[in-house]
Amino acid sequence: MDSSAASPQPSASGTTPALGTPAPAAAVPSAASTNSATAPATTAEPLPMEDVVSTNAVTAEAIARQNQTVVEEFQYLLEKSQQLFAALRELPPTGAKQWQPYFQKTFEIFSKLWKFQQQHRFVLENSYGLKRWEVGEIASKIGQLYYHYYLRTSETNYLQESYVFYDAIRERRYFHEISEMKNSALMIKKLRYYARFTVVCLLLNNREIINTLKEELAALVKEYIDIYRPPDSAEWQLVLQEVSSFINAEKKLQPTNSSGNYLPLTRRLQTSKVISAALDKDGLTSTKLKLQEAILVGNAHNQIKFSELTIDMYRILQSLERETSLIKGTSDGVAKEAVTSAVAAAVSGANAVDSGSNPTIKEESVEETISNQRRTTEKSPKRSNPHKYLLYRPTLSQLMVYLATAFKEVSGDSAMLIYLSADGSKRSSPDTSGAKGYHGGILTNSRKVLEGSDAEQQSISHCLHPGDLIPFTRKPMFLIVDSSNSTAFADMPRVFNHPFMSLLSPTEYPDSIPDTSQIGRLFTLFLHAPLLAFSFICGIAQISPDTWEQCTGLITQAEGKIAELMAAAPLEKPLRRFLQDEFLRQFMIRFALCHTILNAHIAFVEPKHLPTSYPPLPASVLESPEVLSKIRSLAVLANASCFSFEEPVRTDTPVE
């Protein structure tokens, strides 16, 4: 990128017309406008006609020059923005913050471009031929910038800003005229906008608009295929199929009320002062451990995905983000106040809907918005989320590169989380090498399979073995493995004596429990939303909103009790440090809750049906009568008869 190029200065004439208003006509004196009855005795003689014509010609020429300056300035900003936007694709996906100046410069140029086209819309439409879809494309790229900035920072504020621009494009119908222009390239732009908007809405759990977007996208894809018979028709049909499968997978797991409406569910972290207080009683004087980097791997070959994001990755991704204010249309969770950023206020305010011929998003400086958000984030460190790398079906070499990068970025008082959702890989023949930690693990992707190569050798070479992770335990590591061979990662040697914790899924599930691997693994679902997982193993498809709310309260009480037990348990000090981070603490609490619920279920009778951890959590946490009492109350409230409690347990009063 050319960071030395300066933006041209706006015209200093100050005569640029306001948005949507015609340029003022030249004030030319006229003899007919003079009232002879009231005119002073010494009236000026009227200008000769040739002078009037000459004055008009000079004024018109000046306006034309000014308009040309506006057009040239717009063309410069447009070209520069396209260059910077394209250059962002060349930035490496890994690295600490060396990418930030490039994003900042791109935001600044798009801010100037957006504001400039608003201030000079009339001139640009008449002298340059600016079309509404071109304005929409600028807004769409700003939405993309915010989305990719969210991926870089993991802060949901930027995801919400992306939604604001995408939603405004749809509401103002910026791309509406594209269908009438019969241009396949422009139609692809519109389809890509819809696909990106759908991803943002999925991450924000905005189900109401997702269903609408899916229908509109399906109609556009049909129109695109019918008119143009394009070679990429199969790809767009696959996009539609993935969107539908993703939405339906969520529907299969979430209960509804009697009207068929889905019940509210909190998917992101909500800070619990009660749990925090319970686990801060130990009085550790050392600096609190913080989860800094997270690598999320999705390599289950048959799992539903959309835009290189499997359902398991989608759920854990949200579990690693704090709950924020929700925007309109969001169905999950309890709606809080609307987005308060400057851009959101400008777009969703009472005067934002524009019924005139030039509806626009109100003027807003994008760089001011992002700077304000950064200052807010810096002032409120508790609002920050761990940075995440999302790896869909990576090769072993790619995974090792990301592991090394994340390891490098983790500071002394921070930890790295590795989440693996993948098929298991076991040796078919005994290993005679004697190398510990290389007896199998989870599969990674193989881009090329050599002809005539041995299948066993290929499986061993493209397998992530526990021994591959040992070099990275030189810093605190938290490992979650959801796989049929998860136990391969048990008993990993702690060579460097740093905090290490692994949460491992069951390797098999009872035959009576439907296989969920395609729509999201059960262990991951417990870590993400325990009540959803409880409802699934109990076969609860419909429940009243009041009962659902009481069940939610009992789950919260059970998690609070587990937190108290963990605070009192004789955990070793390195392990206890993981409890200092709210995200890792939540995973540990929900692991214990998952173990307790499955252990009480009549179908989960064998050890391979239960999750395990290393180091193991104490029995005082996993077999607590107090927690079991909450589970029994939950089962009674939800009318679930699939549990067996060895001893009579007191039923708690349902939460009001």
Image (tube, grey):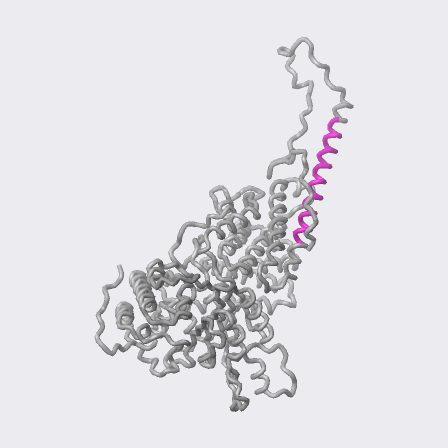
Tell me if I can see residue 528 in this picture: no
Work out whether residue 618 or residue 412 is closer to the camera in this orientation and state it: 412
Residue 127 in the image, given as x and y percentages of width and height:
69, 42
| Residue sticking out furthest to the right | 50
Taking 233 as reference, is 209 above or below it?
above
Residue 45 placement: quadrant: top right
Work out whether residue 319 or residue 533 is closer to the camera in this orientation and state it: 319
Q: Is residue 248 left or right of residue 112?
A: left
Q: Quadrant of the N terminus?
A: bottom right
Q: Is residue 558 magenta?
A: no
Q: Is residue 80 magenta?
A: yes
| Residue sticking out furthest to the front | 285
Residue 553 placement: quadrant: bottom left
Taking 578 as reference, is 349 above or below it?
above
Work out whether residue 47 or residue 19 is closer to the camera in this orientation and state it: 19
Q: Quadrant of the C terminus?
A: bottom left
Residue 382 placement: quadrant: bottom left
Chief SS of the magenta region? helix
What are the residue bounds of the magenta stretch? 55-82
Taking 641 as reference, is 415 above or below it?
above
Residue 443 in the image, given as x and y percentages of width and height:
53, 79
